[in-house]
Image: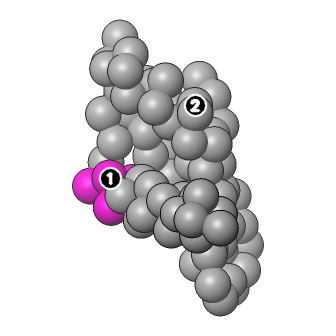
Amino acid sequence: MALKIRLTKVGSVHQPLYRVAVAEARSRRDGAAVEIIGTYRPGDKGNPINLKMDRVEYWLSKGALPTNTMHAMIKKARRAAAAQGAPAAAS
């Protein structure tokens, strides 16, 4: 069973909302997911992606492959988490 970390669309036409899901690679885009690990709202300013980074790391360690889009978003989320953690550690 090959797993992918990918986006599933749940929003309406002009109000896009995506869930970040771990799903079997052969399932439909909006099909059943193994686990929902975050959300993505492209219209939001600031930080439009919310991820449970501990669950992302867990699924990556189990062999789940992120899509190209999710790979870029995970990198951004890691940078944002490191930037938030660095000033708190320096204080």
> Looking at this rendering, what residue extends furthest in the front direction?
91
**Image point 42% across, 63% down: which residue?**
79
Residue 18 sits in which quadrant?
A: bottom right
Could you say which is closer to the camera, residue 58 or residue 84?
84
* Residue in the foreground of this view, choosing between 14 and 78: 78
Residue 53, percent from left and from top: 56, 42
The chief SS type of the magenta part is: helix
Name the residue rendered at 50%, 52% in the picture: 7
Q: Which corner quadrant of the image does residue 75 belong to?
A: bottom left
Residue 70 within the segment the image draws in magenta: yes
Q: Amino acid at mark 2?
A: Arg
Task: Please state if 42 lies on the left or on the right of 5 as rendered.
Answer: right
Left-right relation of 74 to 40: left
The answer, for residue 60, to whether it is visible in the render is yes
Q: Which residue is mark 2?
A: 55
Q: Is residue 28 visible?
A: no
Q: Position of residue 17 (x, y in %)?
A: 67, 67
Range shown magenta:
68-72
User: Tag 2's secondary structure?
Assistant: helix
Q: Is 42 included in the stretch rendered in magenta? A: no
Using the image, tell me which numbered label, if any, was put on residue 31: none
Give residue 71's mark: 1
Mark 1 to mark 2: distance in Å?
A: 14 Å
- Estimate the x, y position of residue 25 in percent, counting from the top left: 36, 29
Q: Residue at x 63, y 28 (%)?
A: 35
Q: How many marks?
A: 2
Residue ID at (46%, 31%)? 57
Which amino acid, mark 1?
Answer: His
The way the protein has been coloured in the rendering is one colour
Q: Residue furthest top?
A: 1
